[in-house]
């Protein structure tokens, strides 16, 4: 299988992130969708109130205050020069308030779309036989084609991915692409952490083989 | 309705792209982490740089703002656990689903692991940790 060259791959990744933002007015964040599903499962339809972060709470308060009293206190809003506008704009939109209320069906549509995307991709390449584990000589070598070891890799690895992304508050899309490109400190540190750990684990795995 | 369709379309576009880039191949991910192939590292860096140029332009034109992503106590440790899991399973959260679509059915086990791990962390966090766990979903 020949993959896209690096530049086309990079363009496609940025294109999808931008498409997501323009069509849904939100940054792409795949692990957040898993969190949304899990919370829905745990708490039912009502989102727990404490999930709102301090920043979002401030933004919501600010938006509510402005709706009530207008916006006298916000620099740049009055008739002074445009130079007063802060570089880091105040969080004006009340959008974060609505953000926790994404319907369950949308999470499922997104995750279903991923499955369909993978299916179409392989179909257009002529298909490949279904496998009970994963394809690839490397994976076969790493697990010795032992089914128990294969599923241990996948189950343990998956659990670490789920636990770690929720703990770090993001994954490759939210932190790795959308966060680092906005130079957000949390995203930069998280991305260095998960790439570093991935490199260390893979090198170790390679040395053990 | 419209948002639902756009959400699904975004999922398909991402799934298709990730498949063609090679992110859904355990071997390609392993080659990226061991530096045997720099292709996907360059792809990732290129996308990050492209977006770093795009966001400020978008912010200027549309007036959009985004929530900050701050460092908290779970950032490093969570990132490390995620990285280990990614290297073992060959899957970051979206990839397990792409692999399923490609007929790599072992990804079903990965998917169960991701849901289980996410669930477990939410319980552990409530019982033992006090810091604010922001998720991407807050963005």
Image (spheres, rainbow, N blue to C red):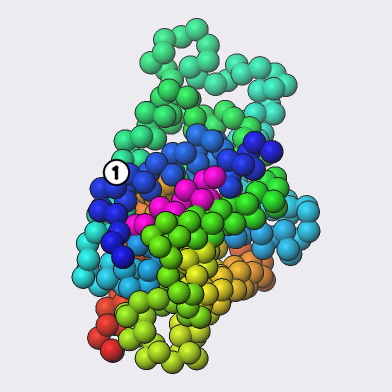
Q: Is residue B77 magenta?
A: no
Q: Is residue B66 visible from the viewing direction of this image?
A: no
Rendered residue at 56%/53% (across/down): A113
Residue nearest the observer in this picture, A1 or B80: A1
Q: Where is residue A208 drawn, in percent x and y?
A: 28, 89
Q: Which residue range is magenta in the image?
A: B9-21
Look at the picture and state if B18 lies above or below A207: above
Look at the picture and state if A39 lies above or below A151: above
Q: Where is residue B22 drawn, in percent x and y?
A: 35, 62
Question: What residue is pinned by disc 1?
Answer: B49
Q: Where is residue A165 drawn, in percent x and y?
A: 50, 63
Left-right relation of B86 to A100: left
Q: Is residue B12 magenta?
A: yes
Label 1, residues with CA under 10 Å away: few <14, some 14-19, many ≥20: some
Q: Main secondary structure of the magenta part?
A: helix
Residue nearest the observer in this picture, A26 or A79: A26
Look at the numbered disc 1 and give the secondary structure of its residue. helix
Rendered residue at 61%/59% (across/down): A35
Rendered residue at 36%/54% (across/down): A188
Residue nearest the observer in this picture, A190 or A29: A29
């Amino acid at each position: 299988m020949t993959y896209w060259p690096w530049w086309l791959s990079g363009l496609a990744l940025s294109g999808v992130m931008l498409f997501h933002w323009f069509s849904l007015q939100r940054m792409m964040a795949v692990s957040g969708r898993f969190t949304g599903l899990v919370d829905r499962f745990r708490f039912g339809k009502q989102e727990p109130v404490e999930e709102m972060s301090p920043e979002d709470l401030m933004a919501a308060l600010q938006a509510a205050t402005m709706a009530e009293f207008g916006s006298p206190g916000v620099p740049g809003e009055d008739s002074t020069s445009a130079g007063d506008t802060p570089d880091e704009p105040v969080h004006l939109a009340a959008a974060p308030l609505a953000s926790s209320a994404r319907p369950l069906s949308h999470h499922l549509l997104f995750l279903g779309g991923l499955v369909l995307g993978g299916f179409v991709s392989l179909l257009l390449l002529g298909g490949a036989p279904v496998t009970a584990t994963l394809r690839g000589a490397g994976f076969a070598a790493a697990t010795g084609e032992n089914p128990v070891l294969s599923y241990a890799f996948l189950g343990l690895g998956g659990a670490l991915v789920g636990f770690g992304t929720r703990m770090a508050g993001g994954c490759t899309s939210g932190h790795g692409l959308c966060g680092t490109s906005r130079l957000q400190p949390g995203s930069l540190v998280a991305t260095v952490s998960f790439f570093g750990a991935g490199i260390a684990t893979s090198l170790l795995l390679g040395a053990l083989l | 309705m419209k948002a639902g369709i756009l959400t699904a379309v975004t999922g398909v576009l991402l799934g298709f792209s990730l498949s063609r880039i090679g992110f859904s191949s355990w071997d390609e991910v392993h080659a990226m982490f061991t530096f045997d192939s720099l292709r996907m590292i360059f792809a990732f860096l290129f996308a990050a740089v492209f977006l770093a140029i795009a966001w400020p332009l978008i912010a200027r034109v549309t007036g959009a703002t985004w929530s900050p992503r701050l460092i908290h106590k779970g950032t490093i440790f969570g990132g490390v656990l995620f990285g280990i899991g990614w290297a073992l399973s060959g899957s970051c959260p979206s990839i397990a689903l792409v692999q399923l679509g490609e007929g790599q059915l072992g990804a079903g086990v990965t998917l169960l692991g991701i849901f289980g791990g996410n669930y477990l962390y939410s319980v552990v966090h409530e019982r033992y940790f006090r810091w604010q766990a922001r998720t991407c979903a807050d963005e």
